[in-house]
Image (cartoon, rainbow, N blue to C red):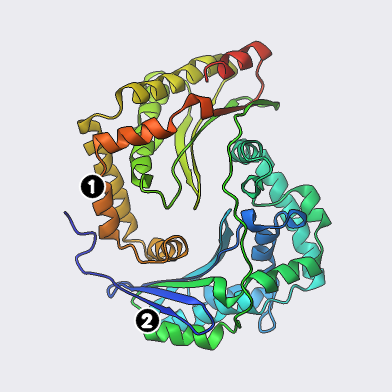
Amino acid sequence: MQKAFDYVPEYKKTILSNGTRVVTEHHPYSRATSAGVYIDLGSRDEPAHLGGAAHFIEHLVFKGTNKRNAYEIVKEIEAVGGELNAYTTREYTCFHSCTLREHLSLSMDVLSDLVSDALFDPVEFDKERQVILQEIMMASDDLEEYIFDMYFERAYPGNALSNPILGTVDSIKAMNRDDLFDFYQTRYKADHLVVSVAGAVNHDEVVELVEKNLLLKPKKPVMVDRTTPNMEIIKQFYKKDTEQVHYLLGLPSSAFNSNSRFESYIVNAFLGGGMTSQLYQKIREDKALAYTVYSYLQSFTDSGLMMFYVGTSEEKLEQVSNMVIEELNLIIKNGITQNQLDFYKRQVRGQIMLGADDIENRMNSLAVNEMVFGEYRPVDKVISEIEKVSVESSRDFINKYFDFNKAGCMLLGKCEKGLQDKVFSLI
């Protein structure tokens, strides 16, 4: 097997006395150092009255700490040519930076400040509320993105996975500063943090910087109630005055920690993961029925979805939806041939190896593997597991998950009732 690196990155892990986990991967030839602080808090972990809280916190900590104002937070990193950012998912929140290796100390100081000592100034709270409301409205204008949020909301009713990451207009308007600050203090605690650093770093130095800067005391653990969702079978149309109809089909898939997750990577690549995929070639290249067509693999710790998206005109929708279903029926009937499997395994392997050269990607992988598996998963091990995928194991994955009785379909745009019925009748 071809090695991912000409050298072997050195991985180390330390659990501090307060429960914070520090993971590092040493890349001796990298000038860049990527550092991240991860909190196992996402939109699925929010109480009902705080929809959008995790994302709101991600915004608000940048508005000032006891040590820095909003401008100083970004100025100190950008002054040395670095980048500072954050994002929220359904299962975790990340604050991350990328700087030259000699500026790691500054990077850890700023990140720690955001995570452990934010002010939540009432004036800034009200201002940022308006920013987030604008973000929600902007997201609703991006219909390709919006239909995915709508799908989650309808497919997982009653489960926190259905919550939109941004929250809703009503939930953000109803939120108050004290509740949000209490949520920050309760959940941003040492026991639930992972600090991940990749680059030409010394592990002991990173541990020392975390102990110096990240002044979080251990608190009584908050039990996270993540109920495994049951997916509702949806067939829904939402009228919108648009030029295109947005088509989204969803099928259950494997969880992130499932033994069949590597089969899901290959099947996704085969069906709609890139320009050589079956759906892209047949719908766009051969028939010119759409500009955008792809499949998307969404994996959580306890469940997953494989989703198929096409944006097309109303006149071409019936043909497009038929072609998607035909392609799925073909893979259900015939599986993937050995030649096809070898091609897409090379593709996925190459993507993983290219990603391994990205220090920020390595930082993220270290943290996610620690949160999900509690262990290090080197790139070479992941590649070896990709290599184990066989025609038979991919067939087992397809047989287990590709069941039209568990499929859902959503349409967004302008579409006559008769056409809607034809599309929905295919599943």
Above or below: residue 124 compared with residue 208 = above
**Which residue is drawn at the image coordinates 24% and 46% (left, top)?**
388
Determine which residue is flagged by label 2.
203
> Looking at the image, which residue is at 69% across and 74% down?
185
Q: Is mark 1 on a helix, strand or loop?
A: helix
Considering every residue shown, the one lying at the far top of the view is: 418
Residue drawn 33% across and 35% down? Answer: 396
Residue nearer the viewer, 76 or 117: 117
Crowdedness near tag 2: few (<14), some (14–19) or many (≥20) residues, C-alpha within 10 Å: many
Check disc 1 and report the residue beneath it. Answer: 387
The x, y position of residue 174, in whole percent, is 83, 56
Q: Position of residue 395 (x, y in %)?
A: 31, 32
Residue extending farthest left: 1
Which numbered disc flags the more N-terminal residue, 2 or 1? 2
Residue 312 image position (x, y, % from top left)? 54, 24
Amino acid under label 1? Answer: Glu
Left or right: 226 as drawn, with respect to 259: right
